[in-house]
Image (cartoon, rainbow, N blue to C red):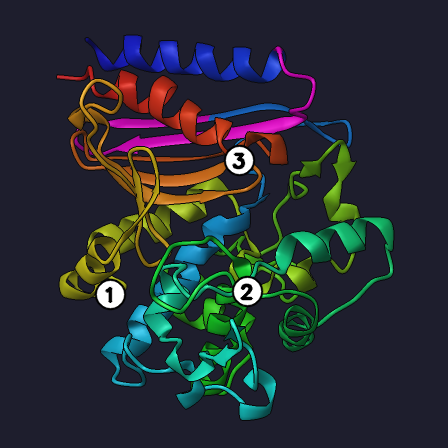
């Protein structure tokens, strides 16, 4: 099938999806392939009465975890840490004292950096209860360190470190603090120094912590949960931190993803570790170091859909599709699309791209 027909079908599916769902106020999609000479940019909906534009910065939620994991990969290559290091080697002892007490035994020292990266620490997820607290108490404010302490005092681990998989932002709070401890810089500054500045991601920044090198002429797209415009809550970024927080237009995100795929950020060996040390996340999905891997399941998940990338709770996604050498980046900006965004990417985008000759 010709690329024109494929892209026309994808665009139609994208626009119809948004137009028929009142929950989605604005949505964005970028598809790029050098192999097939494709560069499609779409936007639908509006932000505070302003028509959506493909150049708008988007809050990408947990897509930011891949940025965090890649920083850890870079520190690994610099010899500043090992994936097998205990977190106690890099974090304040008082902060993490009694962090992981399971069935009466303290496993804190047994948590490895790779357990945080791969969501196998057993620690509870502080993000959702803290978000609920913020949405009912708009002035609620908490630092990443305070969020760690709050989780110790109010939640319990689910299993011994390294034994199972359970997705939790608490792991990425800790990774952000490890990055700050090793580099001696705020996490937002590390993002700037490692990615935004060298890759000329001029319109990118960390929500609530920094400003872009160049302000966009378009407003950041609004994002929602249960009909509530979450970006109206000034302290939201405090409970997101290194678990997300990256705000960028699709073109800037493409720069990051192309650099990662082509080993310009970390070498092939490190990226392979991040992609291959995985746990089962769901049917046809494995989880590595901040990376979602779509894998073959006969009938349900054909080989032509195999891809890897990262997903955010707002229906955000950033993936690479090796078969067609394509990058697929998008966002529906509503928490109801956490799983629906992935399905759209797989069934409405990758399935069509795989038809290209």
In the rendered image, the vertical position of residue 212 relative to residue 26, given as above or below: below
Between disc 3 and disc 1, whose residue precedes?
1
Q: Over which residues does the magenta segment extend?
A: 20-41
> In this figure, which residue is indicated by the disc labeled 1?
266
> In this figure, which residue is indicated by the disc labeled 3?
338
- Residue mark closest to the camera, 2 vs 3: 2
- Residue mark closest to the camera, 2 vs 1: 2
Q: Position of residue 113 (x, y in %)?
A: 36, 74
Tell me if mark 3 has few (under 14), some (14-19) or many (20+) residues whose alpha carbon lies within 10 angstroms of its own.
Answer: some
**Residue 329 part of the magenta segment:** no
Looking at the image, which is closer to me, 265 or 99? 99
Looking at the image, which is closer to me, 118 or 39? 118
| Residue for point 56% across, 61% down | 124
Between disc 2 and disc 1, whose residue precedes?
2
Tell me if mark 1 has few (under 14), some (14-19) or many (20+) residues whose alpha carbon lies within 10 angstroms of its own.
Answer: many
Q: Is residue 53 left or right of residue 83?
A: right
Q: Position of residue 301 (x, y in %)?
A: 25, 25
Between disc 2 and disc 3, whose residue precedes?
2
**Residue 33 part of the magenta segment:** yes
In the rendered image, the vertical position of residue 236 relative to residue 28, given as above or below: below
> In this figure, which residue is indicated by the disc labeled 2?
170
Q: Position of residue 5 (x, y in %)?
A: 29, 8
Looking at the image, which is closer to me, 98 or 308? 98
| Residue for point 18% across, 37% down | 322
In the rendered image, the vertical position of residue 156 relative to residue 254, given as above or below: below
Q: Which element is circle 3 on?
A: loop
């Amino acid at each position: 099938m010709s690329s024109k027909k494929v892209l026309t079908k994808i665009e139609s599916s994208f626009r119809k999806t948004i137009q028929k769902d009142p929950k989605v106020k604005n949505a964005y999609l970028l598809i790029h392939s050098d192999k097939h000479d494709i560069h499609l940019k779409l936007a639908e909906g509006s932000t505070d009465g302003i028509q959506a534009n493909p150049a708008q910065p988007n809050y990408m939620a947990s897509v930011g975890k891949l940025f965090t994991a890649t920083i850890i990969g870079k520190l690994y290559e610099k010899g500043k840490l090992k994936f097998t290091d205990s977190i106690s080697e890099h974090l304040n002892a008082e902060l993490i004292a009694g962090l992981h007490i399971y069935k009466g035994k303290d496993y804190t020292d047994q948590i490895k950096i790779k357990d945080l990266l791969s969501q196998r620490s057993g620690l509870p997820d502080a993000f959702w209860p803290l978000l609920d607290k913020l949405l009912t108490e708009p002035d609620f404010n908490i630092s990443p360190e305070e969020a760690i302490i709050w989780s110790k005092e109010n939640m319990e681990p689910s299993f011994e470190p390294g034994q199972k998989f359970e997705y939790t932002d608490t792991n990425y709070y800790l990774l952000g603090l490890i990055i700050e401890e090793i580099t001696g810089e705020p996490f937002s500054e590390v993002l700037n120094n490692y990615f935004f500045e060298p890759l000329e991601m001029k319109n990118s920044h960390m929500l609530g912590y920094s400003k872009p090198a160049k302000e966009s002429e378009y407003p950041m797209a609004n994002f929602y949960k249960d009909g509530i415009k979450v970006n109206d809550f000034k302290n939201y970024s405090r409970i997101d931190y290194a678990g997300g927080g990256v705000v960028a237009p699709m073109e800037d995100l493409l720069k990051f993803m192309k650099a990662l795929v082509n080993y310009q950020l970390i070498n092939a060996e490190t990226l392979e570790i991040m992609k291959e040390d995985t746990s089962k996340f769901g049917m046809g999905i494995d989880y590595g170091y901040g990376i979602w891997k779509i894998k073959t399941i006969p009938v349900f998940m054909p080989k032509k859909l195999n891809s890897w990338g990262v997903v955010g709770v707002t229906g955000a996604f950033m993936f690479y599709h090796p078969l067609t050498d394509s990058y697929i980046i998008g966002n529906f900006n509503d928490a109801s699309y956490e799983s629906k965004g992935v399905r759209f990417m797989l069934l409405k985008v990758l399935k069509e791209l795989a038809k290209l000759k």
